[in-house]
Image (tube, rainbow, N blue to C red):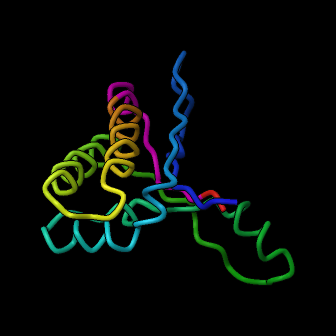
Amino acid sequence: MSVAYYIALKEALPNFDPGVNGKALARVGDALDNLARDNGTPPLMSFFSVSPDDIRAFAEDADVSLPQEQWHSAKDGLTTVLQILQLVENSTLARKQEVLADLEEFRKVLAKAAEHGIDWHLAIDY
């Protein structure tokens, strides 16, 4: 099974499938975040969040206080993805074409979410 990054939306987009591949982004996640940071761009992982229910599924016996799910403006996410797209285009990042394809999928979903004022966060499928 492959790890993949995906977009979690706070609300459904009408007549729009927000599905993305995200496997290439997950494979080069650390390198991609370093590239972003080195160039003054927020890394994708700065948009990461998880619901308390998802955490409970992994730690069902743990008696801990769980953080609240964080939501971010799709406009902010879109700005970041556009910046990262440009950085990757001018880089020698591994799996460059696959990463660009994933980022383009993210761009399309975040543009649509921004258009509708729907918040989002980065999620990871294990």
> Dividing the picture into quarters, in which one does residue 110 lie?
top left
Q: Quadrant of residue 114?
A: top left
Residue beneath the point at 41% across and 33% down: 109
Residue at the image position 86 percent from the left and 81 percent from the top? 61
Numbered range of the magenta stretch: 112-124
Q: Is residue 45 magenta?
A: no
Q: As displayed, is residue 66 above or below residue 97?
A: below
Residue 20 picture location, percent across and down:
51, 40
Circle count: 0
Position above or below: 45 against 76: below
123 within the magenta span: yes
x, y (%) of residue 44?
36, 60
Q: Nearer the viewer, residue 119 or 2?
A: 2
Q: Quadrant of residue 42?
A: bottom left
Q: Position of residue 79 (x, y in %)?
A: 22, 46
Residue extending farthest bottom: 63
Residue at 28% from the left image edge and 41% from the top image edge: 75
Q: Indicate left or right for 10 with 54 as reference.
A: left
Q: Residue furthest right?
A: 61
* For residue 112, above or below residue 85: above
Tell me the quarter of the image containing the N terminus.
bottom right
**Nearest the camera: 57 or 37?**
37
Quarter of the rendering occupied by the C terminus? bottom right
| Residue under the point 18% across and 51% down | 89
